[in-house]
Image (cartoon, rainbow, N blue to C red):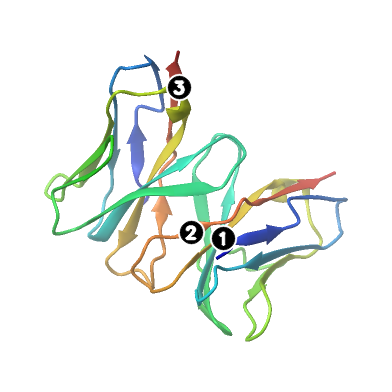
Amino acid sequence: SQQGEEDPQALSIQEGENATMNCSYKTSINNLQWYRQNSGRGLVHLILIRSNEREKHSGRLRVTLDTSKKSSSLLITASRAADTASYFCATAFAKAAGNKLTFGGGTRVLVKP
Amino acid sequence: NAGVMQNPRHLVRRRGQEARLRCSPMKGHSHVYWYRQLPEEGLKFMVYLQKENIIDESGMPKERFSAEFPKEGPSILRIQQVVRGDSAAYFCASSHNSNEKLFFGSGTQLSVL
């Protein structure tokens, strides 16, 4: 399967702690994206990192990409209760048409107040 | 600038009926993607369309499912003779160019009785 795989599947932390989740994939990519989904809602784009980039920041989010290991990580610093959601990595494979994304199974994050 | 609009939000059908799901992309976006999501799982790619053309339908079942994105009007995902296994959340996403982030609608929750 070309699908990204997230690890862990679920994460429970206290407000103020950092949350780290990982994503692995199998084939060459153009870019890797992270999305957030609140229960029963559509996905919201968080950050896009291109294959020639190694790290990106956006507010309290930090994403790394290691193309040699075919893996990425998403770090949420100083978590808040509002960060409770499912987080998905999605890969745009180099040979895929357009911006067709392949999603992983997600990491369900619970931030306890 | 309204986001991606999907309707209906909820759709209930009996086995054997037809389901029509509509998606209006963001203004100026000509790339539309349909995804299906089962509970507690990631999104599975179904089809990628660009105005009046199907670019990639590799994720769509060969039978009973069809999609279109006419020159005028919304994109339509049509499921004929629905079965219980079609029950899922169907998400539409759009993008301006073929190598950018996706903007998702809130989804249509299809329930087949």
How crowded pointer 3 is (Cα within 10 Å; few <14, some 14-19, many 20+) is rated as: some
Mark 3 residue element: helix
What residue is drawn where x is 13% and y is 49%?
A: A54
Q: Is residue B56 visible?
A: no
Instruction: Estimate the spatial distance between the alpha carbons at disc 2 and disc 3, rounded to whole Å.
Output: 24 Å
Asked if both marks, 2 and 1, belong to the same chain, the answer given is: yes
Task: Say which chain tag 3 marks.
Answer: A
| Residue contact between numbered discs 2 and 1, judged by CB atoms under 8 Å | yes
Q: Residues within 10 Å of mark 1 (few under 14, many from 20)?
A: some
Q: Amino acid at mark 2?
A: Phe
CA separation, marks 2 and 1?
8 Å
Q: Which residue is mark 1?
A: B3
- The residue that label 2 is drawn on is B103
Q: Which residue is mark 3?
A: A81
Identity of the residue furthest to the front in this view: B1
Chain containing mark 1: B
Quarter the N terminus of chain B occupies: bottom right
Q: Would residue B67 be found to the left or right of residue A44 on screen?
A: right
Which element is circle 2 on? strand
Query: Would you say A85 lies left or right of B105 here?
Result: left
State the image quarter where residue B65 is shown.
bottom right
- Name the amino acid type tagged 3: Ala
- Work out whether mark 2 precedes mark 1 in sequence or the reverse, and give the earlier one: 1
**Residue drawn 30% across the image and 70% down it:** A95
Q: Quadrant of residue B113?
A: top right
Q: Residue at x 62, y 63 (%)?
A: B61
Residues beneath discs 2 and 3 located on the same chain: no
Closest to the camera, between mark 2 and mark 1, is 1
Q: Position of residue B55 (x, y in %)?
A: 48, 78
- Measured as percent of width and height from the top left, residue A38 is found at 53, 36
Q: Secondary structure at mark 1?
A: loop
